[in-house]
Amino acid sequence: MTMTKTLLACLLAAGAVTAHAESATYAIDPSHTFVTFEANHMGTSTLRGRFDKKEGSVTIDKAGKSGKADITIDATSIDTGVAALDTHLKSKDFFNAAEFGSAKFSADKFAFSGDKVSEVTGTLTLLGKTQPVTLKASNFNCYNHPMLKREVCGGDFETTITRTQYGMSYGLAYGLPDNIRLLIQIEAVKQ
Amino acid sequence: MFGAHRALLALLAGAAVGTAQAAPQEFSIDPANTHVHWEVKHFGTSTSRGRFDAISGSVTLDREAHSGSASFSIATAPISTGFAVFDGVLRGPYLLATQEYPSAYFVSQRFTFNGDALAAVSGEFTLRGVSQPLRLRALRFSCRQATEPAREICGGDFETEFNRSAFGITHSLPFVADKVHVLIQIEAVRQ
């Protein structure tokens, strides 16, 4: 009887631990979450730009090795450091930000290597077109933030998209590339 | 006789043109395609990025003699991370101290070639009033004939890294890493 009780208590405790570890939601920290793109310019140098406004949340189940992510990127917040280029990139030639104000990344397939996220697969919706995308983690880590007193998870992810798949073909004839590398910094705070 | 003179003159003129081409050529930086991006690790987790937006300078390049010199001035206040609060902190007295040190400088008189390809540019970098030797590795370097304006443009991507503590910038160590990775896009127009 005592044995059964102890076993039950153990199982209950295990159950509680499992339930606790099941899944946690993290809100992205906008100060440490950015999408930077790289495009080769006329075969010479690499042009970089960044999207400054974004919001979203990530759910990670470390025990079940699964997760979900929904991140919205404001297409009007593009910043290359050159105002005239920003204006051109926001125009119909590229992001058509007046008509398509945001791009959206949704993922529901998280691959793990040990206890670290190694790949996130989902879809990217850009210019109203949705295409599959896999982000590869080059670094993933969780830490206890000393000031926030919360767990923060994040890392560096990257992928390369083909812009013509989204209907963005301006400048291909002048030597602007079709393949655009995306470098994604993300940190998200446990809720 | 007269014909021979003429031929000799033409030869000499041709040689002079040839020499002129081999002589050092002056290039002026195209600010729209010249940026300094930096990367620094945040809490060992994700990569924070920033950009200096106002770079001026000139390059002298002798492709025949495989030599060159460069002089760049980087304004420290026009810094952009995509997060205004960070930009303010970076400009402040604990980090870049932009009021006291409004410019950083890179000066080089040593261009290293690998065959005909520019491989590295070595010189002295001055940041926050401290000068240290710095070597920029050329990832790609090429020249193209542009139509608008009808000038030759040379440029490419360079990278380097340094420890910010070597320049007296120790704020937020070790949460924000000491090592700063620098990515330089540069295009310059022949004068």
Image (cartoon, coloured by chain):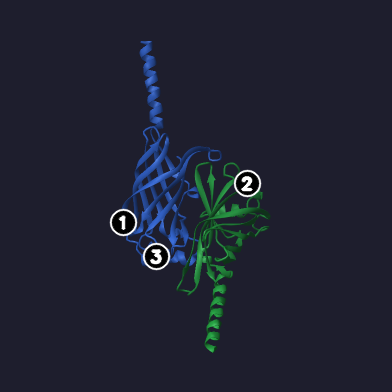
Chain colours: A blue, B green
Q: Position of residue B106 (x, y in %)?
A: 62, 59
Residue B32: mark? none
Rounded to the nearest angstrom, the CA distance separating label 1 from label 3 is 24 Å
Using the rendered image, report if marks 3 and 2 lie on a common chain: no
In the rendered image, which quarter contains the C terminus of chain B?
A: bottom right
Q: Amino acid at mark 3?
A: Gly
Residue A134 in view, yes or no: yes
Residue occupying image coordinates x 46% and y 56%: A50
> Could you tell me which chain the residue with mark 2 belongs to?
B
> Could you tell me which chain the residue with mark 3 belongs to?
A
Say above or below: B95 vs A58: below
**Residue B102 lies in what quarter of the image?**
bottom right
Using the rendered image, report if marks 2 and 1 lie on a common chain: no
Residue for badge 2: B171
Q: Position of residue B120 (x, y in %)?
A: 56, 56
In the rendered image, which quarter contains the N terminus of chain B?
A: bottom right
Residue for badge 3: A175
Residue occupying image coordinates x 65% and y 48%: B166
> Which numbered mark, 3 or 2, is in the foreground of this view?
3
Residue for badge 1: A129
Residue occupying image coordinates x 35% and y 58%: A163
Circle 3 Cα neighbour tier, 10 Å, few/some/many (<14 / 14–19 / ≥20): few
Q: Amino acid at mark 1?
A: Lys
